[in-house]
Image (spheres, rainbow, N blue to C red):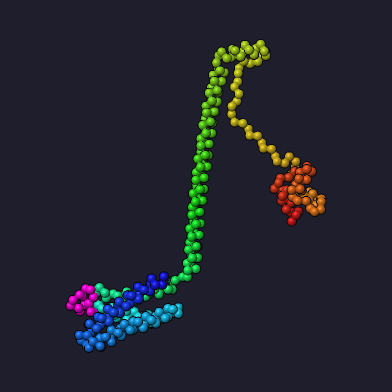
Amino acid sequence: MRAKTVLPAVAMTAVSMVLTLAVVVMWLGAAVPWPVALVVGLGIDGGWLATLAYERRLAAQGDHNRAVTAVGWSFGILAAGVLIAHALTAEHSAGAWLAVAWLPIAAKALWLVHAMWERTALTPVALDAIRGIQQEARDEAAVARARLRAEAATEETRLTAVTEAGARVARVQAKTAQTLAGAWSTLETARAGEETGRALTSVTARVTPGVTPHWELPVWGPTEPVAARSLESAPALTDDALDVIVDEIRTSETPALSYREMAARFRAAGHAASEMRLRAAWKRVAA
């Protein structure tokens, strides 16, 4: 993995150094002896290599020096400036030389990328742990989504069933109301008829003299709700009395009775108390 960032940086550095040396020799060779131009080119490349090597040493130690970094970028900018100046003064292929003038800056940028990669690189164990955590999070999210979809489908099915049942009940109620209305209408017609009164009079007069022949329909209206029966027919015991009875039953044997045994004997003795009050009393006396 390290070669993916260091190899491009090394290749770009080598190309830019060769171009810088060649341009310096060709450009200054016409004005000064070529050994002097060679020394100038090697000086630029040597300074760049020296600062780069020192930067790499500091990076390997986990350190950083801004002054060294500034010097390295200065050499890179100087090399790029030499290439740009040569491209602007060249009589032939000026565009080609200008196109490669950015290579020193690109080489420094690649080394910067490689340094950032080294500072953020993780071991295979850490990467495996991260992948495991991410996979676990994805699994949990998928399970949560599936659970939500299943709950939504279940709720939709329940609502559909409730709606259909309600519709059936409404239809039955409507049909029943219609039947009752028809029966009531029939009874009302029969009661209001003239022949009905005479027939009832002729029948009831022989059987029960003095009975009025007028036929009153039964009242069809709201009924009074039946009062709910009390859970405890006997008068409710006070908390203190209930505590005394529970404690006497619980400690009637050794070891003390369990709650179920005490409750059974409490009921068998004819006492009355709700389950909630009885359990509360048990907790108070057993505490």
The structure residue drawn at horizontal position 30% and vertical position 84%, both measured from the top left corner, is 42
- Asked which quadrant contains residue 52, the reply is bottom left
Specify whether residue 158 is painted magenta: no
In the figure, 238 relative to 88: above or below?
above
Q: Quadrant of the N terminus?
A: bottom left
In the picture, measured across the screen, residue 208 lies left or right of residue 186, that is: right
Where does the image place residue 264, in percent across and percent down from the top left?
76, 45
Residue in the image at 53% along x and 31% along y? 172
In the depicted structure, whether residue 198 falls above or below residue 147: above
**Number of callouts in the render?**
0
Q: Position of residue 278 (x, y in %)?
A: 73, 48
Q: Residue 116: percent from the left, percent from the top?
A: 41, 73
The segment highlighted magenta reads: 85-97
Give residue 82's position: percent from left, percent from top. Answer: 26, 80
Picture residue at 78% right of the left edge, 51% below the top: 257
Using the image as rendered, state which of residue 90 and residue 271 is in the foreground: 90
Residue drawn at point x = 22 percent, y = 88 percent: 33
